[in-house]
């Protein structure tokens, strides 16, 4: 076999390989939508309604409220009188808004305590404490 034909064949194979490789999506492009959808579908994913200034009264009554995404009302809202409703949902990672009251310095850390153990407001005995007659 002659050398120019062999070089031409190698160049052609390299060009085909580069073309196929450039058409294949990269690994990070495949992972990005899955990551976004996973974040958007957390247990407490919430939505609120964003509406324009000329929105109906039903939308204005919902101002500042967050709904779990599975329990959110359908748009347009029931009772909407606007012909071309331009209300939309704004997505939030959590249903709660505002400052987190849990203290990282409390014994429970961020595990659910409020950090206000000194302000115990229960009256009476602890119902889970063992009584002397139970110790048999």
Image (cartoon, rainbow, N blue to C red):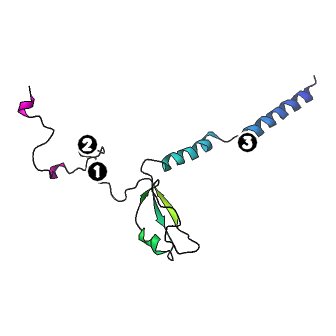
Say above or below: 32 vs 74. above
User: Given contact means CB atoms under 8 Å apart, are the residues at marks 2 and 1 in contact?
Assistant: yes
Which contiguous range is marked in magenta?
A: 112-136
Would you say the magenta stretch is mainly helix, strand or loop?
A: loop
Q: Earlier in the sequence, mark 1 or mark 3?
A: 3
Say above or below: 1 vs 39. above
Q: Earlier in the sequence, mark 2 or mark 1?
A: 1
Q: Earlier in the sequence, mark 3 or mark 2?
A: 3
Furthest residue toward right: 2
Q: Is residue 72 toward the left or the right of residue 117 in the image?
A: right
Rendering coords of residue 109 (x, y %): 28, 44
| Local SS, label 2 | loop
Residue receiving disc 2 = 108
Rendering coords of residue 89 (x, y %): 50, 62
Rendering coords of residue 121 (x, y %): 15, 53
Residue in the image at 87% along x and 30% along y: 9
Q: Quadrant of the N terminus?
A: top right
Name the disc covering residue 8, or none.
Answer: none
Q: Is residue 33 toward the left or the right of residue 43 in the image?
A: right
Residue receiving disc 3 = 23
Indicate which label's residue lies in the foreground, 3 or 2: 2
């Amino acid at each position: 076999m002659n050398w120019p034909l062999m070089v031409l064949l190698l160049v052609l194979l390299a060009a085909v390989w580069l073309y196929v490789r450039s058409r294949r999506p990269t690994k990070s492009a495949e992972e990005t939508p899955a990551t976004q959808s996973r974040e958007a579908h957390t247990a407490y994913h919430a939505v609120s309604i964003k509406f324009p200034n000329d929105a109906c009264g039903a939308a204005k009554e919902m101002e500042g409220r967050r709904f779990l995404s599975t329990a959110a009302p359908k748009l347009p809202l029931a009772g909407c009188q606007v012909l071309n409703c331009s209300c939309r949902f704004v997505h939030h990672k959590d249903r709660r808004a505002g400052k987190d009251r849990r203290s990282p310095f409390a014994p429970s850390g961020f595990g659910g305590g409020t950090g206000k153990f000194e302000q115990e407001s229960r009256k009476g005995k602890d119902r889970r404490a063992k009584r002397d007659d139970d110790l048999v």
